[in-house]
Image: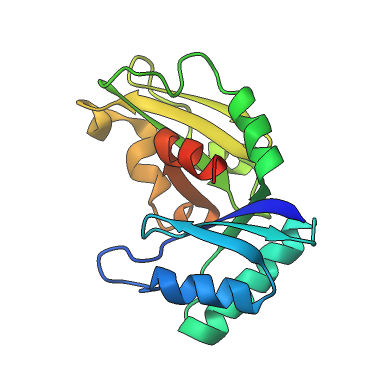
Amino acid sequence: MIRQIAFLRGINISGKNRVPMAELKACFEGLGFADVRTYLNSGNIAFSSGQDDEDILAGQIEQMIKEKFGIAVPVFVISREGLEDVLRHAPGWWGTENKAVYDNLIFILKPATFSEVFHEIGAPKDGLEQIQDYRGTVFWSFSRKDYQKTNWWSKTAGANIGGKLTIRTAGTVRKICGM
């Protein structure tokens, strides 16, 4: 069995796309996944599966959510080993203890690519934010006090790009990787 992690995009936000975690966990178990654990209420699920194709897993999970909860939710699946690899390649400026900086990991939902995302959002603003891509993810850090002045903050939630990304904080990603 391979330890996998699923990140669901856009659930339980401001009362929209409501998905109770206990029900979601039961649905994952219904798909035959083992040792299912959820973290927070925002669609972070660790599970074990005999399937190693992350695209197939994402499709199965998306279909299950549509059937059970009646909503279309994009899903990013990565093995724990793959996520550990991503975290090993984090730039030195990302995920530090600096409380003035907010660190996120952006997961690019297939079939979108980093170059497509970068083309739509543009370069980060010097002195306010930094980005670095690695294997379908983007390390993104920005000044907490100046977040509204950054280029990526407003655009990551925009209609054109928002559906191609799901974002988690550095702390959340590290916690989930350890589950």
- Residue 145 x/y as whole percent: 19, 26
Quadrant placement of the N terminus: bottom right
For this rendering, which residue is in front, 23 or 149? Answer: 23
For this rendering, which residue is in front, 50 or 13? Answer: 50
- Residue 126 x/y as whole percent: 38, 16
For this rendering, which residue is in front, 83 or 147? Answer: 83
**Residue 158 against residue 118 in the figure, above or below:** below
Residue 26 visible in image: yes
Q: Write the residue at 47% across / 59% down.
A: 38
**Residue 70 against residue 50 in the figure, above or below:** below
Q: Write the residue at 66% across / 53% down.
A: 4
Q: Write the residue at 24% across / 34% down.
A: 148
**Residue 19 against residue 132 in the figure, above or below:** below
- Residue 68 x/y as whole percent: 52, 85
Direction front: furthest residue: 35
Residue 8 visible in image: no
- Residue 2 x/y as whole percent: 75, 52
Left or right position of 158 against 5: left
Left or right position of 45 against 41: right
Q: Write the residue at 45% across / 30% down.
A: 140
Number of residue marks: 0
Left or right position of 30 against 56: left
Direction left: furthest residue: 145
